[in-house]
Amino acid sequence: MASLDKTLAIQQANQEFFRQFNGSSEDICGRNFRDVVHPSAQQPLVRQFSNLLEGKHQRFVTPVLAVGPGEETAFTVPLTAVAVRGGVPDTTAILVMMPTAGEGEGARVVSRRKKILSAMDARILEGIAAGVSTIPLAASLYLSRQGVEYHVTCLLRKLKVPNRAALVSRAYSMGVLKVGAWPPEVVEDFVK
């Protein structure tokens, strides 16, 4: 469990929260909550926190992809956020509860944030995710049709998937594509 202020800075947390992120009070308190979630989950999560602070909702529950120590691993954990208002007018805090990954639903996945894509691979992946077919994609990137097919084949091999639909699905599951963005965008951390 952690308490956040209006800027989403972590004000205090319990020992389980610190243990989950392999840190101490000094390491974690004062950091923005966005720093402990995967880049692909930050934008939608900030939107939900904004609705909470504006009073549109009293709480929300959502699965979130959290980033472990050293950004070497990521794990999915259910997050419950509750707005706490009180005392001095206009004082709002957010209480965040994230059960430890060992408590059932949270599954640890290895998600090394390696720079696995070239800039061209990133543009092609974004095009595929947006549903652009090969020839218009080739024209917009100043490549031949075969050039696009070559890059698509390389992407299929890199992500170990059999087809374009699985490629997009794997990219989202790895956090390579930003969640909640349209047109689809590749998270810059994955681009060489």
Image (tube, rainbow, N blue to C red):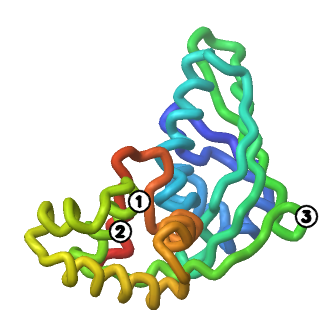
Question: Which residue appears farthest toward the left when viewing the image?
Answer: 142
Q: Residue at x 55, y 18 (%)?
A: 54
Q: Type of residue at label 3?
A: Glu
Q: Residue at x 59, y 67 (%)?
A: 173
Q: Residue at x 36, y 88 (%)?
A: 154
Q: Mark 1: few, some, or many residues within 10 Å (few <14, many ≥20)?
A: many
Q: Residue at x 17, y 69 (%)?
A: 138
Question: In x, y percent, where is residue 117?
Answer: 33, 80
Inter-mark Cα distance, 1 to 2: 6 Å
- Classify mark 3: helix, strand or loop: loop
**Mark 3 or mark 2, whichever is nearer to me:** 2
Question: In x, y percent, where is residue 62?
Answer: 71, 44
Of 105 and 137, nearer the camera is 137
Of 174 and 189, nearer the camera is 174
Which mark is first along the chain, 1 or 3?
Answer: 3
Q: Which mark is residue 129?
A: 1
Q: Mark 3: few, some, or many residues within 10 Å (few <14, many ≥20)?
A: few
Q: Which mark is residue 104?
A: none
Q: Which mark is residue 103?
A: 3
Q: Type of residue at label 1?
A: Ala
Q: Type of residue at label 2?
A: Leu
| Relative height, residue 88 to residue 96 (above, below) | above
